[in-house]
Amino acid sequence: MANCQMKGMALRGIVSCVPEREIINERDFPWFDSADIRKITAMVGISSRRFADEHTCTSDLCQAAGAKLLEQLQWDPKTVDGLILVTQTPDYIMPPTSCLLQERLGLPETCASVDVSLGCSAYVYGLWLANSLITAGACHRILLMAGDTPSKYVNPKDRSTALLFGDAGTATALEDASDSRMVASYIMKTDGKGAEQLIVPGGGFRNRFPDEQSQHCVFMDGAHIFDFTRFRIPPLIKELLDYSHNAANAYDLYIFHQANEYLIRFIAAQCGIEISRVPLFLKQFGNTAAASVPLTLALSKLPVTEKDLLQVMFIGFGVGLSWGAVSLNVPANCVLQNFVYHREQARS
């Protein structure tokens, strides 16, 4: 069922990786009126992003993050028996990019590898899938890779999207754990009626070779997505608080999909969440789609505390339309790191 509690999964670490190239909205989009850029920046909260170069794909960023994470945790790659890649910017239509990552990370042939096509809700859904596999005993150690390079499908002349999206890749280490406190509560939701409100119309098999080049770029009905978020996410959080039997102040951190600073602040106020518990990194990185939630935790770190476990809520929402949230305990010694990807160094 979409509302469920699962036991036995520990989050051991998250490493995020962002491209070297920094895009600054006011500097790099001279074809937009500067007053409009400042207005959008004030509302959405995004001043700059990171863009991958033409040779760098989601797999490269996720591979770099995964290799760094394995090294930090001192995990032998041969002990990883599951790899989930959640992205909407795969390297190819076929083969699955997860298969490329399995080989490039030196994971064994016994590692089950799968791609999942999700964007803004990707990380919550990825945790839900990984937790299901671990709870069922199908996997014992999973690398959950969540990343996107939306700069490759954004029309730079489209005012509604050009100033919003950035690129990033992440890797999360998950493993089975006997600690009875490792309980995660999930609420997952979908409404496909809103699919056309946030879509790349061309390039798939419904519209393989569109006549209009713009059909290969993302279209977003900003007003519709704004209202969807405003009306659906506060009830989602309140439902999860009730379902997990927690008060709002029980959580050390709330990690939101980084889409719009005004909306995140609005939702926090609606749900009685102290804004000090809500990390915000839109200003420097924008909306990184699937990578957004794990990137935010990797950047924010965990609060210094005497507790060995911290309670965290992850909230994802957007393309699909799809939304979900998870409440889980994160070990205080969880590895959290972000670094900048240098393509030449990665190849050496």
Image (cartoon, grey):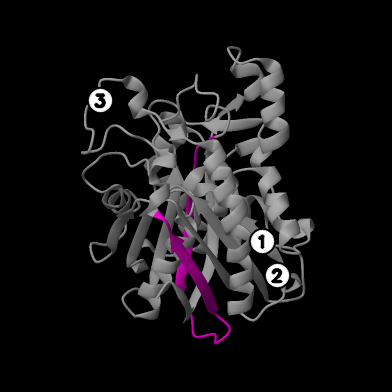
User: Residue, x 53% and y 76% (percent of image)?
Assistant: 184
Front-lying residue, 124 or 33? 33
| Pointer 1 local density, CA inside 10 Å: few below 14, some 14–19, many at least 20 | many
Pointers 1 and 2 in contact (CB under 8 A)? yes
Name the main secondary structure of what is drawn in magenta: strand
Q: Quadrant of residue 283?
A: top right
Circle 3 sits on which residue?
A: 210
| Pointer 2 local density, CA inside 10 Å: few below 14, some 14–19, many at least 20 | some
User: Residue, x 25% and y 37% (percent of image)?
Assistant: 204
Circle 1 sits on which residue?
A: 254
Q: Is residue 198 left or right of residue 222?
A: left
Compute the Cα span from label 1 to label 3.
41 Å
Circle 2 sits on which residue?
A: 251
User: Residue, x 62% and y 51% (percent of image)?
Assistant: 230
Amino acid type of the residue tagged 2 in the rendering? Tyr
Bounds of the magenta segment: 165-191
Between discs 2 and 3, the one toward the N terminus: 3
Instruction: Examine the structure image and report whether residue 166 is included in the region drawn in magenta.
Output: yes
Instruction: Examine the structure image and report whether residue 123 is included in the region drawn in magenta.
Output: no
Q: Is residue 123 left or right of residue 54?
A: right
Amino acid type of the residue tagged 3 in the rendering? Pro
